[in-house]
Amino acid sequence: MQIETPPRIEAPVQDGTRAGDGPAQPRSFKLRRGRGTAGQRAALQTLRPRYGIDPGEGPLDPERLFGRRAPLVLEIGFGMGEATLALATAEPDRDVIAVDVHTPGVGALLRDAAARDLRNVRVLEGDALALLRDRLAPGTLDELRLFFPDPWPKTRHHKRRLFSPAFARLAATRLRPGGRLHCATDWTPYAEQMLAVVAGEPLLVNAHDGWAPRPAWRPETRYERQGLALGRTIHDLLAHRVTDVTVDHP
């Protein structure tokens, strides 16, 4: 079975602008360049050579980046890095690329990864869409994690939500056959959108009949605690890249 080439997602430059020759793509994140703590600022200065990923445009070679060949995980939007650190510590045989645009959070993850002497974490401050589209080869990822992304709750902002049909197709092409997509959100309308998008993507199959039971191994994040304190329901969605189709990669 031949699946058509995924629609191109262009990296957003500014709201309502175009990047390259593709359609306008609203930015799915808010730039947050706060100063952070002294320790976070020091980590940004001293630890990027060890743990940071060059924000350039060339393709990434994970084997060269980590110095070994291992299953590769991409985590988009890691906040202050609690889940990243916990899972990387628990899974030393898997390598993790963590991406966020929150400068203090990047500094915190660099600092804490060094404190634990983790060898399997690399950090990119920048646009995850550009990384997926331009720098990761098809079939590279063992898992893609999207924990508590910005829900953009106002109706006029729904177009800014990261999890869209185009994103799901791009993410699926970067997963290996059988690779896992794991999303979590405390915003029920966004969870329903995610569920519908996965159901409509031929390259993905939901691992459950609807939302997944909360995995005991997924660490609780700060955003999750905030959602629970507000009485919200946490939704996990686990899907896998199908293994029995052929796809033309972008």
Image (spheres, rainbow, N blue to C red):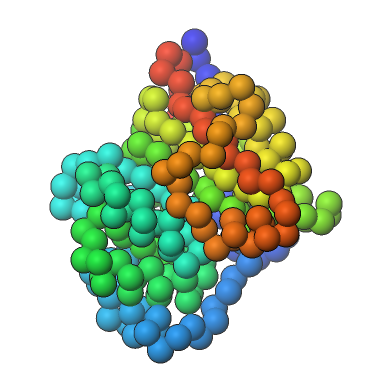
Residue placed farthest to the bottom in the image? Answer: 38
Q: List x then y, in percent, for residue 186.
A: 66, 50
Q: Residue at x 29, y 54 (%)?
A: 89
Q: List x then y, in percent, for residue 50.
A: 23, 69
Q: Is residue 223 visible?
A: yes
Depth check: give the residue in front, 174 or 14: 174
Depth check: give the residue in front, 189 or 6: 189
Residue 6 appears left or right of 117: right
Q: Is residue 133 visible?
A: no
What is the tally of numbered marks visible in this picture? 0
Depth check: give the residue in front, 48 or 54: 48
In terms of image quadrants, where is residue 110? bottom left
Q: Residue at x 56, y 32 (%)?
A: 212
Q: List x then y, in percent, for residue 237.
A: 57, 36
In terms of image quadrants, where is residue 249? top left
Up-down relation of residue 208 to residue 142 (above or below) = above
Q: List x then y, in percent, for residue 25.
A: 66, 52
